[in-house]
């Protein structure tokens, strides 16, 4: 009988998926565990072969949450088999098999990538951590939930000063106001095309193409969303001046994540 701490996770790499630039609240512990908060639940996770293992017992709801968050219900092996038609993608998948697009909460993903603008990863993580400590629920053990838009609105720009987000504070507030009021409707965005969803998100001050595409890919699981940053621009110029190959159709965002991580690691 399978332990209540284990989840079958084939074609999955926990370490790379947690630390490849799509989420900012995972920390690697000295014992090799990955420590993080998902939807208000604290997890310490590690991997042994094809098993994702929690340090504590998990109930059925938490099991479903982990399967959903890490996209363990999606056949990434099949997706990546399709990528093998392209030489560069085949090399990227071979180098880093098991990268999965995380299904983060839309608000957390949107807010995180607003914070990420013109920023480096250590500073992004610091700002997000301070935001959660300032306005999130205390989960014990030094962990905090990601605060909802309403608490961000209550804090206001001045109230966000302790997180040291600089010019991004006014964008965070605007995003919180528009999401809380329903002007930005997450459920509606789920039903829209990538281009339509991006236009909705760009109604928020400071949200351009890159932040919108990141939010759609990492917060709405829209695999066609294709965020372009400096690294991806370089990849496209060097390897795909005519655009991505046909084998990526419908999975451009997944291809981007493999190429992004592989190219940065060369």
Image (cartoon, rainbow, N blue to C red):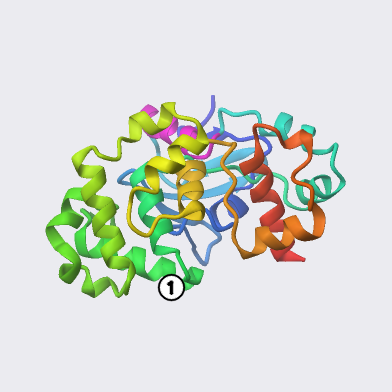
Residue 150 coordinates in the image, percent (x, y): 17, 49
Residue 75 coordinates in the image, percent (x, y): 65, 28
Question: The C terminus appears in which quarter of the rendering?
Answer: bottom right
**Left or right: 102 with respect to 139?**
right
Q: Is residue 102 above or below residue 96?
A: above
Q: Nearer the viewer, residue 1 or 175?
A: 175
Magenta highlight on residue 7? no
Q: Return the residue found at the far left.
A: 154
Mark 1 lies on a secondary structure that is helix
**Left or right: 99 with respect to 25?**
right
Q: Which residue is mark 1?
A: 123
Residue positioned 85% across, 37% down in the render: 85
Range shown magenta = 59-71
Which is the main secondary structure of the residues drawn in magenta? Answer: helix
Label 1: how many Cα within 10 Å (few below 14, some 14–19, many 20+): some
Residue positioned 40% across, 55% down in the render: 207
Q: Quadrant of residue 251?
A: top right
Residue 243 coordinates in the image, percent (x, y): 75, 46
**Left or right: 168 with respect to 90?**
left
Residue positioned 58% across, 36% down in the render: 223
Q: Is residue 254 above or below residue 128?
A: above
Question: The N terminus appears in which quarter of the rendering?
Answer: top right
């Amino acid at each position: 009988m399978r332990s209540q701490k284990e989840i079958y996770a084939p074609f999955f790499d926990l370490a790379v998926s947690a630390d490849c630039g799509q989420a900012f609240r995972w920390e690697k512990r000295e014992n090799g565990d990955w420590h993080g908060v998902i939807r208000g639940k604290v997890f310490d996770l590690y991997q042994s072969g094809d098993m994702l293992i929690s340090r504590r017992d998990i109930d059925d709801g938490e099991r479903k949450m982990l399967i959903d968050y890490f996209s363990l219900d999606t056949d990434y092996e099949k997706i990546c088999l399709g990528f093998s038609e392209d030489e560069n993608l085949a090399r990227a998948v071979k180098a880093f098999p098991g990268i999965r697009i995380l299904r983060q909460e839309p608000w957390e993903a949107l807010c995180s990538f607003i914070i990420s603008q013109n920023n480096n990863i250590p500073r992004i993580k610091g700002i997000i951590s301070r935001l959660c400590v300032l306005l999130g629920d205390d989960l014990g053990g030094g962990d905090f939930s990601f605060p909802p838009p309403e608490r961000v609105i209550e804090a206001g720009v001045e109230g966000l000063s302790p997180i040291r987000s600089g010019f991004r504070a006014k964008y965070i507030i605007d995003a919180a106001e528009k999401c809380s009021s329903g002007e930005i409707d997450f459920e509606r965005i789920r039903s829209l095309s990538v281009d339509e969803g991006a236009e909705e998100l760009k109604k928020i001050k400071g949200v351009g193409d890159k932040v919108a595409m990141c939010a759609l890919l990492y917060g709405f699981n829209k695999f066609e969303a294709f965020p372009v940053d400096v690294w991806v621009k370089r990849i496209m110029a060097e390897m795909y001046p005519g655009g991505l190959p046909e084998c990526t159709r419908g999975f451009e965002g997944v291809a981007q994540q493999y190429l992004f991580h592989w190219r940065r690691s060369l």
